Amino acid sequence: MSVLSTIKKRFSPYSFDKTNVSFEDIESAFEAARWAPSGYNNQPWRFVYTSRNHNNFEKMLSFPVEANRKWMKDCGGIAVILAKTQSDYNGQLDPSAQYCCGLAVGQMLVEISALGLHSHQIGGFNSKELAAFLGLPDSVIPMAMMAVGRTSEEPSKDRKREPLKVLVLR
Ligand SMILES: Cc1cc2nc3c(=O)[nH]c(=O)nc-3n(C[C@H](O)[C@H](O)[C@H](O)COP(=O)(O)O)c2cc1C
């Protein structure tokens, strides 16, 4: 069974309809992340989820840069994606922590699409302030924030991807 059509449904909208998305609404997306592969099964991904109706939602909106905050304010919930860069296996730097974190988020995105929800990740946020607010040790890095929600927006017609012949040598 191919999941390609679910993958292709995903796009990053710039508008959300302010519907709350509870943790329970997207629990299966975190479950999808949980089953990602990782070096030494180290599972370096961690998440913080704040639904729209949670007291901390406004606080979470203080971290994105203004251009992102403008559209994020209408989303149903915000996930923070964290990479734990110190290995549980040997206490050393985990060189694949960020790679594996991305794998987990990739799986999460597929499930969010399958649920009929939408997501838009951002790298444009104040990582230092967010880390301080969350009380993170230096070894845990905020990789991205992700707005989740419902939208009536349609994907733009000019979304582009490199053709496979550019991406794959065969
Ligand atoms: C790590 C990461 C950081 C991103 N940062 C931003 C951002 O700060 N602001 C924004 O509007 N979109 C951001 N995006 C969304 C990308 O611009 C978007 O995924 C890309 O243009 C492809 O469009 P699509 O998601 O609709 O396929 C980010 C995406 C990722 C994965």
Image (tube, rainbow, N blue to C red):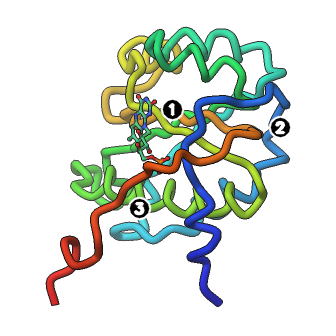
Q: Secondary structure at mark 3?
A: loop
The amino acid type, in three-letter code, at marker 2 is: Ser
Nearest to the observer: residue 3 or residue 25:
3
Establish if 102 lies above or below 143: below
Q: Are marks 2 and 1 in contact (CB under 8 Å)?
A: no
Mark 1 close to ligand 1, CB under 8 Å: no
Q: Which residue is mark 2?
A: 22
Q: CA distance from mark 2 to mark 1?
A: 16 Å
* Residue in the picture at 36% in, 15% down: 128
Establish if 141 lies above or below 64: below
Crowd band around label 1 with a 10 angstrom C-alpha radius: few (<14), some (14–19), many (20+) = many
Quadrant of the image occupied by residue 114: bottom right
Mark positioned earlier in the residue sequence (3 or 2): 2
Mark positioned earlier in the residue sequence (2 or 1): 2
Tell me, for residue 145, which label it has, or none: 1
The spot of residue 43 in percent (x, y) is 46, 59
Crowd band around label 3 with a 10 angstrom C-alpha radius: few (<14), some (14–19), many (20+) = some
Q: CA distance from mark 3 to mark 2?
A: 28 Å
The spot of residue 82 in percent (x, y) is 45, 39
Q: Are marks 3 and 2 in contact (CB under 8 Å)?
A: no
Q: Which residue is mark 3?
A: 42
The spot of residue 112 in percent (x, y) is 68, 55
